[in-house]
Image: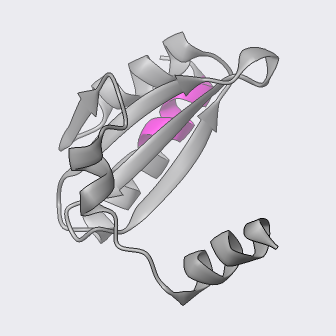
Amino acid sequence: MTDKTARLTKNIDAFVRAHGGSARAQVAYLGQMGARISLVGEDGEWGDQVAPDVETAKAALEAAQGVTVQDDFDGEMAAEVRTGPYEWRRMAGIQL
């Protein structure tokens, strides 16, 4: 396991522990920037991590505990996300 993979795994494990003990994840290719790991915790909190590439992202998720990886950030996964005032203000600001 590379240092980057180990660091990502540590961050993912910490997120899972802090948000109910399990999480759903989805990996999105970002081009030269790498890959984004979107996480939704059991409690509805969400977060993300950026990996240098898709392979590193998948390796970190495989090593993490309590994570179910999905191919898509589908409607069911999106429905589990709990948003707060910050997200609503930010989304509203994008529309202005």
92 w.r.t. 72: above or below: below
Q: Which residues are magenta?
A: 3-9
Farthest bottom residue in view: 85
Residue 52 colored magenta? no
* Percent of width and height locating residue 35: 61, 25
The image quadrant of residue 36 is top right
Q: Residue at x 68, y 24 (%)?
A: 30
The image quadrant where one finds the C terminus is bottom right
**Residue 12 in the image, given as x and y percentages of width and height:** 41, 47
Residue 23's place in the image compared with 64, above or below, is below
**Based on the displayed image, in which of its 4 quarters is residue 70 positioned?**
top left
Prevailing secondary structure of the magenta residues: helix
Q: Horizontal placement of 34 versus 25: left or right? A: right
Does residue 5 appear to the left or right of 83 in the view shown? Answer: right
Q: Which residue is pictured at 32% across the width and 69% down the height? A: 18
Q: Nearer the viewer, residue 22 or 2?
A: 22
Residue 28 place in picture, x, y as percent: 53, 26
Q: Position of residue 3 (x, y in %)?
A: 60, 27
Q: Is the residue 38 above or below the residue 52 in the image?
A: below
* Residue nearest the viewer, comparing 14 with 19: 19
